[in-house]
Amino acid sequence: MLEAILSDVISVFRSTFMSGDLISIAIALVSVLVAVFVMQRTGQIASMTLLALVVFVLIGFGRSLLSPPPAEMADRVTGGRAAAKIESGWFEFANMSAGTLLAYFIAFMLLIFVLFGLKSVIRR
């Protein structure tokens, strides 16, 4: 079981932070940096990780709204396209396994913890 979780964390880390999509990497790093700079002590790591994940989702959703629509959605008005994207995003989230959600949480938490440690060392 521990091996499966570790494997999921590594795959999430690779797909999020080491993919070729520079915009997604920038979104992930911005969300992590927001959490690092808001965090004041290590006891806040869980809530700051949750904050980073929420920021990651919100900025990613904003990116998808601003991107040009695919051909099958080109005839929809902006409100209909936004509603369709919200619905498809919700279904993707609902179909995500608990292991994958945990892997995202752990991957973001580790990165926040390391960067917060660096911030603490630099401030001293």
Image: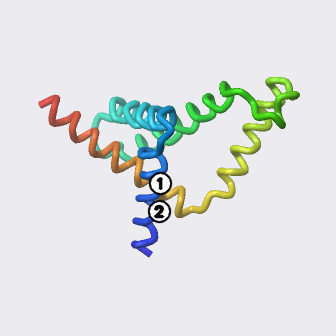
CA separation in Å, label 2 and label 1:
6 Å
Side of 35 where 67 appears, left or right: right
Res. 99 mark: none
Task: Count the numbered circles shown.
Answer: 2
Crowding near the residue tagged with mark 1, few <14, some 14–19, many ≥20 C-alpha atoms within 10 Å: many
Residue contact between numbered discs 2 and 1, judged by CB atoms under 8 Å:
yes
Tell me what residue is drawn at x 43 percent, y 31 percent.
30
Name the residue type under label 1: Val
In the rendered image, the quadrant that contains the N terminus is: bottom left
Name the residue type under label 2: Asp
Q: Nearer the viewer, residue 66 or 32?
A: 66
Tell me what residue is drawn at x 16 percent, y 29 percent.
123
In the rendered image, the quadrant that contains the C terminus is: top left
> Farthest residue in the bottom direction?
1
Residue 22, image x and y in percent? 47, 34
Circle 2 sits on which residue? 8
Crowding near the residue tagged with mark 2, few <14, some 14–19, many ≥20 C-alpha atoms within 10 Å: many
Task: Examine the image and state in which quarter residue 82 appears.
Answer: top right
Res. 12 mark: 1
Residue 95, image x and y in percent? 68, 58
Q: Nearer the viewer, residue 3 or 121?
A: 3
Q: Secondary structure at mark 2?
A: helix
Task: Examine the image and state in which quarter residue 45 appears.
Answer: top left
Side of 92 where 51 appears, left or right: left
Task: Examine the image and state in which quarter residue 98 appears.
Answer: bottom right
Q: Secondary structure at mark 1?
A: helix
Tell me what residue is drawn at x 85 percent, y 24 percent.
77
Q: Nearer the viewer, residue 104 or 54?
A: 104
Tell me what residue is drawn at x 71 percent, y 27 percent.
68
Residue 97, image x and y in percent? 60, 62
